[in-house]
């Protein structure tokens, strides 16, 4: 904005462009099983989370055929931490009628390597979900330098 001399109309144009891109990428996921659409999912998550200035925990709530019922940011934190409660995530699963979830959070540092705290949190969610017959398909860490899948890394 400094370079544009405070031109508010330019800022609004960029915000509209960003919203349009998110809408298009989200549309590529609608009505399709999420597990068979990995690249579209990663494109959407990268666009919505990779460059956020603080950590967020996003949960994709899925139905029995793994289509998205809801996409919600359940917690927003600081530049290096986000805190969420497993019971609140499971409560939303019951409210929505989700049979599976995808956990996603970003690392504003740019590096996607999960921390010990990330892995411990995921174990708590998996344990809570198991009691309610909710599958945790994956936990993805999204950063501008890439992403890490807990399932592929062997953490799930």
Image (cartoon, rainbow, N blue to C red):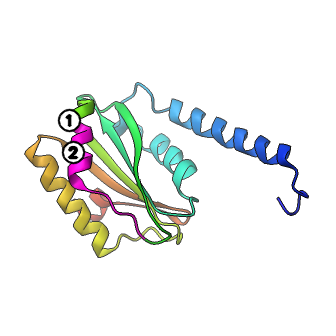
Mark 2 to mark 1 CA distance (whole Å): 6 Å
* Within-10-Å neighbours for mark 1: few <14, some 14–19, many 20+: few
> Is residue 154 something that shows in the picture?
no
Disc 2 and disc 1 in contact, CB within 8 angstroms: yes
Q: Which residue is mark 2?
A: 90
Picture quarter containing residue 41?
top left
**Magenta portion: prevailing SS class:** helix
Is residue 152 rendered magenta in the image? Answer: no
Residue range corresponding to the magenta coloring? 81-93
**Identity of the residue drawn at 78% across and 41% down:** 13
Q: Which mark is residue 122?
A: none
111 to 52, vertically: above or below: below
The residue lying toward the viewer, choosing from 39 and 118, is 118
Name the spot of residue 88 as percent of width and height, x first.
25, 48
80 to 77, vertically: above or below: below
Is 15 left, or right, of 6 in this rendering?
left
Q: Which mark is residue 94?
A: 1
């Amino acid at each position: 904005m400094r370079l544009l001399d405070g031109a508010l109309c330019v800022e609004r144009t960029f915000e509209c462009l960003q919203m349009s891109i998110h809408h298009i990428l989200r549309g590529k996921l609608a009505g399709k099983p999420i597990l068979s659409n990995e690249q579209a999912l990663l494109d959407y998550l990268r666009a919505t989370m990779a460059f956020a200035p603080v950590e967020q925990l996003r949960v994709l709530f899925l139905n029995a055929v793994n289509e998205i019922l809801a996409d919600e940011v359940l917690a927003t934190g600081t530049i290096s931490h986000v805190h969420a409660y497993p019971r609140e995530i499971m409560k939303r699963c019951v409210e929505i009628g989700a049979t599976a979830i995808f956990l996603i959070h970003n690392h504003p540092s740019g590096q996607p390597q999960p921390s010990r705290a990330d892995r411990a949190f995921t174990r708590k969610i998996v344990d809570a979900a198991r009691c309610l017959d909710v599958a945790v398909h994956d936990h993805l860490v999204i950063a501008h330098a890439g992403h890490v899948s807990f399932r592929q890394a062997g953490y799930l």
